Image (spheres, rainbow, N blue to C red):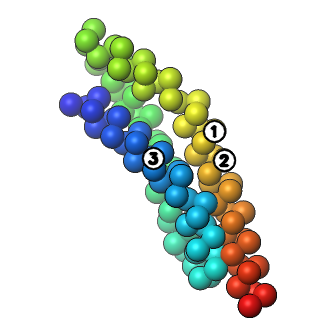
Amino acid sequence: MILDFTLALNALIWFATLILPLYGLITGYKLRRDLMMRASLLIVCLVVALLTLEVTLTVFATDADREELTVLQGYRPGLFFGTSGSLAMGWALFVLGKALRARR
């Protein structure tokens, strides 16, 4: 059950990571820095929760769960680079949205 929850959390993080750059552009245009900060912090907290669950699963995993756990751990490098790239792109688009608003 914890493995299923961890896989669902991984999917949620990827979904949030894909939407964050567009969200950064919208919040920049609306001049809502506080919302962008909350979204960034939420993604970072979800990644920390995922890593905590992975460590827990590594300790308590049964032999039947080892294969799925290996697949989940294979996503880790992509998760770090994808999340950090998405956060950087989101904040860059936030600044671009502010600039578009200022020109208007």
Q: Are marks 1 and 2 in contact (CB under 8 Å)?
A: yes
Label 1 SS: helix
Query: What amino acid is labelled 3 in the image?
Result: Ile
Q: Are marks 3 and 2 in contact (CB under 8 Å)?
A: no
| Crowdedness near tag 1: few (<14), some (14–19) or many (≥20) residues, C-alpha within 10 Å | few
- Of mark 3 and mark 2, the one earlier in the sequence is 3
Residue, disc 2: 85
Q: In the rendering, which numbered label is found on residue 13?
A: 3
Residue, disc 1: 81
Q: CA distance from mark 1 to mark 2?
A: 6 Å
Q: CA distance from mark 3 to mark 2?
A: 13 Å
Q: Which image quadrant: the N terminus?
A: top left
Q: CA distance from mark 1 to mark 3?
A: 13 Å
Q: Toward which corner of the image does residue 90 lie, by quadrant?
A: bottom right
Q: Which image quadrant: the C terminus?
A: bottom right
The picture places residue 60, in percent across and down from the top left corner, at 28, 18
- Of mark 1 and mark 3, the one earlier in the sequence is 3
| Crowdedness near tag 3: few (<14), some (14–19) or many (≥20) residues, C-alpha within 10 Å | many
Instruction: Identify the residue at image location x=36%, y=42%.
Output: 9
Residue 41 visible to the viewer: no
The picture places residue 78, in percent across and down from the top left corner, at 58, 33
Query: What amino acid is labelled 2 in the image?
Result: Gly
State left or right for residue 39 relative to residue 64.
Answer: right
Label 2 SS: helix
| Crowdedness near tag 2: few (<14), some (14–19) or many (≥20) residues, C-alpha within 10 Å | some
